Image: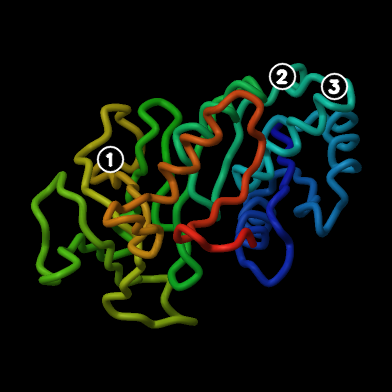
């Protein structure tokens, strides 16, 4: 009986098509809204209020934007009664997850993957861990310098080999650029069982300022945690540089 509202981009980025086709194959009802470039955000807010879907799908920042826009127009996102928000295609930081839960009044699930192989994990709403689809991928967590496996629980670079989803991109040991650690079995006892991944960031997701590494996700969490901050642009410059 669910009605899914698909607010992922419907363009050359595969994520919107992946969810739309999966829902269609499963026989679920869905609204192909797309992102704001496909259907204006103001119109999407009206559609959400009129259609009252039970599941919202979209990139975390856009789902936050839709909730804030609805509130600005006098609506209450929590009154829609969503039972679930599903995110993908963008890092879901702790602060973004907290905001999504508060704005929509619904649990948040997150999926993690890549265009080169498809969906690699899906998080549960209980323990908020990422369950690894070990039957679809051979996964290694390696030391960035030595390219040797790191011990379980230690952060390293994620390397994957698609086992069944590599027809278009048949990579072997694809270096994803993601920093992860193996988290062991999830206590939720969900259907996937086995190993979980803890996402930490990306190898390219750092600035080095005066010898200190700044993680993009940590900067984002810190800024979005400030009252009144809805979005931001961050840049690093040396003393004496002109403003951009």
Pointer 3: what residue? 75
- The image position of residue 191, as x and y in percent, is 36, 38
- The image position of residue 128, as x and y in percent, is 39, 32
Pointer 1: what residue? 193
Using residue 48 as the reference point, say whether residue 171 is left or right of it.
Answer: left
Q: Give me the residue at 89% from left, 41% from top.
A: 42
Q: Gap between marks 1 and 2, in whole Å?
A: 32 Å
Q: Gap between marks 1 and 3, in whole Å?
A: 40 Å
Pointer 2: what residue? 78
Q: Give me the residue at 73% from left, 62% from top.
A: 10
Select label 1 or label 3 by which is in front. 3
Using residue 188 as the reference point, say whether residue 2 is left or right of it.
Answer: right
The way the protein has been coloured in the rendering is rainbow
Q: Quadrant location of the C terminus?
A: bottom right
Residue 10 image label: none
Asked whether 11 or 17 is in front, the reply is 11
Q: Give me the residue at 35% from left, 33% from top.
A: 190
């Amino acid at each position: 009986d669910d009605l899914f509202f698909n607010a992922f981009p419907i363009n050359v980025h595969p994520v919107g098509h992946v969810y739309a086709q999966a829902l269609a194959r499963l026989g679920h009802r869905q609204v192909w809204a797309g992102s704001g470039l496909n259907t204006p955000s103001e119109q999407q807010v009206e559609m959400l209020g009129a259609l009252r879907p039970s599941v919202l799908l979209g990139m975390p920042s856009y789902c936050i934007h839709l909730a804030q826009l609805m509130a600005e127009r006098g609506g209450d996102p929590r009154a829609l009664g969503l039972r679930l928000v599903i995110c993908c295609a963008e890092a879901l930081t702790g602060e973004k997850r907290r905001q999504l839960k508060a704005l929509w009044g619904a649990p948040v699930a997150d999926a993690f993957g890549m265009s080169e192989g498809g969906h690699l994990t899906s998080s549960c709403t209980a323990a908020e861990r990422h369950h690894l689809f070990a039957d679809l991928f051979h996964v290694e967590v390696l030391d960035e310098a030595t390219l040797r496996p790191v011990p379980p629980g230690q952060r390293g670079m994620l390397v994957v080999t698609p086992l069944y989803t590599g027809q278009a991109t048949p990579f072997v040991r694809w270096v994803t650029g993601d920093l992860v650690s193996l988290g062991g079995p999830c206590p939720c006892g969900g259907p996937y069982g086995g190993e979980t991944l803890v996402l930490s960031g990306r190898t390219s997701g750092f600035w080095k300022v005066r010898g200190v590494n700044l993680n993009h996700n940590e900067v984002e969490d810190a800024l979005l945690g400030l009252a009144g901050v809805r979005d931001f642009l961050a840049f690093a410059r040396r003393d004496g540089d002109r403003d951009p």
